[in-house]
């Protein structure tokens, strides 16, 4: 009995000594034995960690946070002289009001949006936002206001590039059209009605919208994200805040959003922007023809088996098409290796060619298929007339 007691005492002494050493040197080893007030174990995101753009808990907060600083407000002003009133030439009128009395020029102002595409101050917007402006001022998301100058523009796609003198600006991240599909969530960011920076949400309703009569070259993203006057030139971004389009126009009978808005795809906008920055303008191919769509009635009158192709309605004298002996009444079927289904495809295909290069055109003349070689010319600048855009 005495021997057992001695063993117990020694074991207890050693255990207490070990406990003392652990409590002194490694107290965290004993933390598991402390009672915990937590009812259930939670997995919590650490502060500052990135949140997915489409997170159910946060909505599109992260996407907006990434894109908002790169979207600017654009304010323009233009001096417009009013039409001279007939009374200005009346000697009695001039006697009372003085010989120096003249109509004062009227100041018109406009607003829109733009997207910062590089930290050194290049901003992409719509041509109609800055068209004929005498002064351009941009307001950054942080409240700064800067004067801007026009780098170049392309009226036929309704895009323009302006620049401010600043460094380290928050530039947008470009997305890829290959990742964009019908049904994808998108955000439209801009300055609608001048109320301030605004984010609206919708989906991609359709891709490749053409024949709308908005621009010469059309390939729009259609979206139901609310786009209103003042949104023009702003950003259409995906659920991660990546740029997928430049908001350009709306379909509306009232001037407000009816859920049909159009944006220029980022793929087109980027190519045009790079040409504007490099050349001050966009260089496109041209052959000098006027084409029209082949209706069933025209196909019947010309003895055509289908309505595919572009009917040549006119040829500019001395143009590349004239020199290649293309004639009115010919039906253009292919440019190079690409088939042509309608005049819009013809326009896009020819515009994509480089001036100076020679390309084979396949045509139907009467009942014969012929091929001609055309030396591509450079598309002349468009004499732009303002359209009633919002």
Image (cartoon, rainbow, N blue to C red):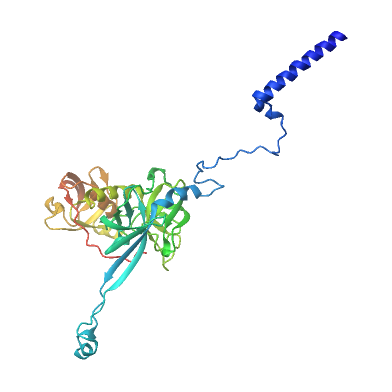
Residue 167 in picture, x, y percent from top left: 33, 48
Q: Is residue 213 something one can see in this rendering?
A: no
Quadrant that contains the C terminus:
bottom left
Residue 257 or 300: which is nearer the viewer?
Answer: 257
Residue 370 in picture, x, y percent from top left: 18, 47
Quadrant that contains the N terminus:
top right
Q: Residue furthest bottom?
A: 92
Residue 106 in picture, x, y percent from top left: 29, 74
User: Residue at image x 23%, y 80%?
Assistant: 102
- Residue 32, compared with residue 233, is above or below; it is above
Q: Is residue 333 left or right of residue 201?
A: left
Q: Is residue 252 left or right of residue 312?
A: right
Q: Is residue 333 left or right of residue 256?
A: left
Q: Is residue 105 something one can see in this rendering?
A: yes
Residue 194 in picture, x, y percent from top left: 41, 64
Q: Is residue 385 left or right of residue 25?
A: left
Residue 160 or 326: which is nearer the viewer?
Answer: 160
- Total of numbered circles in the picture? 0
**Based on the displayed image, in which of its 4 quarters is residue 209 positioned?**
bottom left
User: Residue at image x 70%, y 35%?
Assistant: 36
């Amino acid at each position: 009995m005495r021997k057992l007691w001695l063993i117990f005492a020694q074991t207890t002494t050693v255990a207490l000594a070990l406990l003392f050493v652990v409590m002194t040197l490694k107290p965290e080893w004993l933390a598991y034995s402390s009672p915990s007030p937590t009812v259930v174990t939670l997995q919590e995101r650490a502060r500052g960690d990135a949140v997915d753009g489409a997170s159910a808990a946060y909505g599109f907060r992260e996407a907006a946070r990434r894109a908002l600083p790169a979207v600017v407000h654009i304010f323009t002003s233009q001096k417009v002289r009013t039409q001279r009133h007939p009374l200005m030439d009346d000697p009695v009128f001039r006697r009372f009001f003085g010989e120096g009395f003249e109509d004062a020029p009227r100041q018109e102002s406009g607003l829109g949006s733009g997207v910062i595409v590089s930290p050194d101050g290049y901003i992409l917007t719509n041509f109609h936002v800055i068209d004929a402006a005498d002064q351009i001022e941009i307001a950054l998301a942080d409240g700064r206001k800067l004067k801007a100058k026009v780098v170049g523009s392309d009226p036929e796609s309704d895009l323009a590039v302006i620049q401010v003198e600043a460094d380290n600006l928050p530039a947008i991240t470009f997305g890829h059209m290959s990742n964009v599909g019908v049904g994808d969530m998108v955000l439209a960011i801009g300055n609608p009605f001048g109320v301030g920076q605004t984010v609206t949400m919708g989906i991609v309703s359709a891709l490749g919208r053409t024949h709308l009569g908005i621009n010469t070259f059309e390939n729009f993203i259609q979206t139901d994200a609310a786009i209103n006057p003042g949104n023009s030139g702003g950003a259409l971004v995906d659920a991660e805040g990546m740029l997928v389009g430049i908001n350009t126009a709306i379909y509306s009978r009232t001037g407000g959003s009816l859920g049909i808005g159009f944006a220029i795809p980022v793929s087109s906008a980027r190519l045009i922007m790079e040409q504007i920055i490099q050349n001050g303008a966009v260089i496109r191919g041209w052959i000098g023809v006027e084409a029209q769509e082949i209706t069933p009635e025209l196909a019947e009158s010309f003895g055509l088996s289908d309505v595919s192709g572009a009917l040549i309605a006119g040829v500019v004298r001395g143009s590349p098409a004239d020199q290649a002996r293309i004639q009115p009444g010919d039906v253009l079927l292919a440019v190079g290796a690409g088939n042509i289904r309608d005049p819009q495809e013809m326009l896009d295909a020819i515009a994509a060619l480089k001036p100076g290069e020679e390309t084979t055109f396949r045509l139907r003349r009467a009942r014969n298929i012929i091929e001609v070689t055309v030396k591509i010319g450079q598309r002349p600048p468009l004499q732009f007339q303002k359209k009633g855009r919002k």
